[in-house]
Image (cartoon, grey):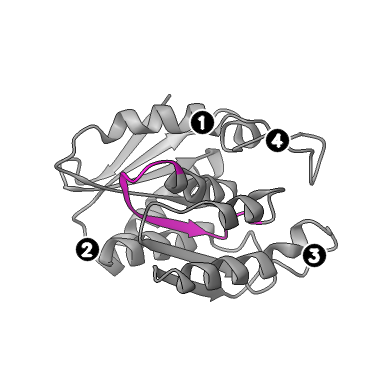
């Protein structure tokens, strides 16, 4: 597992983000945006994901777009990430964009080590996740959700459910008394992922 560190490496606040090459290409922009919004007292550990659809998926599911099915590598990915959280004197927040956002939410159902979840445009359309969330308790009290206002306007029938899924999950968390924010961004799924992720982490850090 390759880990890239940004920010203050000795900070007591550690942000953990699964990333791919596209995320790494704009990571400096994300870091600047977090510093501008929430200050520079944080360390961000970017975890390079080798197989996006496999390593971040909590269970197997058929392809929704393209030809690549989803695997069940999330459990192993989380096991590796938890090795980075062994210093219990530090605070850990997990987050990410798209499928990494979904993985971050799922991870918080598995362990209480994370003080918050920063899920920017998470793939809540993922088959079976909403049913899973309805039957299990998330183990953090701070959750940020966001979505682009054009993301649900797609011809893909499964992915077009993302808006309703996001609203439903937000309502579910509020009814449970959790500290949850839902923010709507302008544009489709591919607009400014670095800035959307920065907003997610900044809010979760301050809470």
Foreground pick, 2 / 145: 145
Q: CA distance from mark 1 to mark 2?
A: 32 Å
- The vertical placement of 88 against 186, above or below, is above
Residue at the image position 48 percent from the left and 30 percent from the top: 77
Numbered disc in front, either 1 or 2: 1
- Asked whether residue 119 is drawn in magenta, I would say yes
Residue indicated by mark 4: 70
Foreground pick, 67 / 178: 178
Residue indicated by mark 3: 154
Magenta stretch in the rendered image: 110-124
Q: CA distance from mark 3 to mark 4?
A: 20 Å
Q: CA distance from mark 1 to mark 4?
A: 13 Å
Residue at the image position 42 percent from the left and 62 percent from the top: 143
Numbered disc in front, either 3 or 2: 3
Picture quadrant of residue 179: bottom left
- Counting residues from the start of the chain, the first of labels 1 and 2 encountered is 2
Residues at badges 2 and 4 in contact (C-beta under 8 Å)? Answer: no
Numbered disc in front, either 1 or 3: 1
- Counting residues from the start of the chain, the first of labels 3 and 2 encountered is 2
**Residue 74 appears in the figure:** yes
Mark 3 surroundings: few (<14), some (14-19) or many (≥20) residues within 10 A = few
Q: Residue furthest front?
A: 135
Question: Quick one: SS at disc 1?
Answer: helix
Residue at the image position 57 percent from the left and 31 percent from the top: 55
- Counting residues from the start of the chain, the first of labels 1 and 3 encountered is 1
Numbered disc in front, either 2 or 4: 4
Q: Which label is found at residue 39? A: 2
Mark 2 surroundings: few (<14), some (14-19) or many (≥20) residues within 10 A = few
Numbered disc in front, either 3 or 4: 4
Q: CA distance from mark 3 to mark 2?
A: 36 Å
Question: Quick one: SS at disc 4?
Answer: loop
Q: Which label is found at residue 75? A: 1
């Amino acid at each position: 597992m390759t880990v890239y560190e940004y920010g203050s490496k000795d900070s007591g606040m550690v942000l953990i983000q699964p990333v791919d090459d596209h995320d790494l290409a704009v990571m400096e922009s994300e870091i600047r945006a977090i510093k501008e919004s929430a200050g520079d007292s944080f360390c961000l550990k970017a975890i390079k994901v080798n197989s996006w659809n496999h390593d971040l998926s909590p269970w197997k599911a058929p392809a929704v777009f393209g030809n690549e099915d989803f695997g069940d590598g999330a459990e192993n990915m989380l096991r590796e990430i938890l090795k980075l959280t062994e210093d219990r004197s530090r605070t850990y927040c997990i987050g990410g964009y798209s499928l990494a956002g979904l993985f971050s939410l799922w991870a918080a159902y598995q362990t209480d080590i994370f003080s918050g979840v920063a899920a920017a445009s998470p793939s809540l359309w993922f088959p079976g996740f909403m049913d899973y969330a309805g039957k299990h308790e998330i183990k953090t009290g701070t959750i940020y959700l966001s979505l682009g206002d054009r993301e649900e306007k797609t011809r893909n029938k499964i992915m077009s459910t993302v808006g309703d899924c996001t609203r439903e999950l937000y309502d579910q968390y509020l009814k449970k008394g959790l500290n949850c924010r839902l923010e709507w961004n302008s544009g489709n799924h591919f607009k400014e992922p670095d800035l959307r992720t920065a907003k997610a982490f900044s809010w979760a850090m301050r809470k």
